[in-house]
Amino acid sequence: MEVINTDNTKAQMRKGVLELCILSILSQGDAYPTEIIDKLKTSKLVVVEGTLYPLLTRLKNSGLLAYRWEESTGGPPRKYYRLTELGENYLKELQNSWKELVNVVNTTIESGKKL
């Protein structure tokens, strides 16, 4: 019998919710990438800069995010991202879709236990 490694499946699930998590973090206020990564790590969602930066750029190019430069006391200026109005509306849609998906998955898992 073949042993199946669940690591890849877990990684794919995390990637699928990463956009929702990033937008949710930014709904709490402006943040620069290192802050976003730290908040994701606190939630046990480990993300590296090489994954985050392209996603932030895509979200910005889609009009969901905007950014501003701010001087830093200990280094180069920092780019702070924020949700746009379009981003806020998109986040609400994602949150509703997520809640529906969680309900469907939980219902399916619970009905599977009864078999």
Image (cartoon, rainbow, N blue to C red):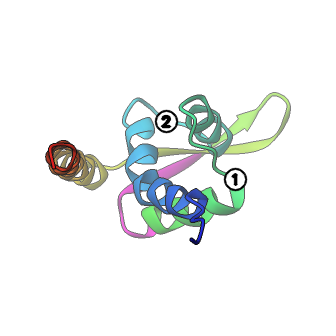
What residue sits right under mark 1 in the picture?
48
Horizontal and vertical percent for residue 29?
44, 31
- Does 41 appear above or below 33? above
The Cα–Cα distance between marks 1 and 2, rounded to whole angstroms, is 19 Å
Q: Residue at x 49, y 53 (%)?
A: 14
- Does 67 appear above or below 26? below
Q: Residue at x 56, y 38 (%)?
A: 40
Q: Nearer the viewer, residue 3 or 85?
A: 3
Q: Residue at x 46, y 52 (%)?
A: 18
Q: Residue 2's mark?
A: none
Nearer to us: label 1 or label 2: 1
Horizontal and vertical percent for residue 21?
43, 44
| 1 and 2 marks in contact (CB < 8 Å) | no
| Side of 69 where 81 appears, left or right | left
| Side of 86 where 81 appears, left or right | right
The amino acid at mark 2 is Asp
The amino acid at mark 1 is Val
| Side of 88 where 37 appears, left or right | right
What residue sits right under mark 2 in the picture?
30
Secondary-structure class at tag 2: loop
Horizontal and vertical percent for residue 52?
60, 56
Circle 1 packing at 10 Å, graded few (<14), some (14-19), many (20+), is few
- Does 59 appear above or below 35? below
The stretch of residues the image draws in magenta is 61-68
Q: Earlier in the sequence, mark 1 or mark 2?
A: 2
- Does 54 appear above or below 79? below
Q: Is residue 43 shown in magenta?
A: no
Secondary-structure class at tag 1: loop
Q: Quadrant of the image for the N terminus? A: bottom right
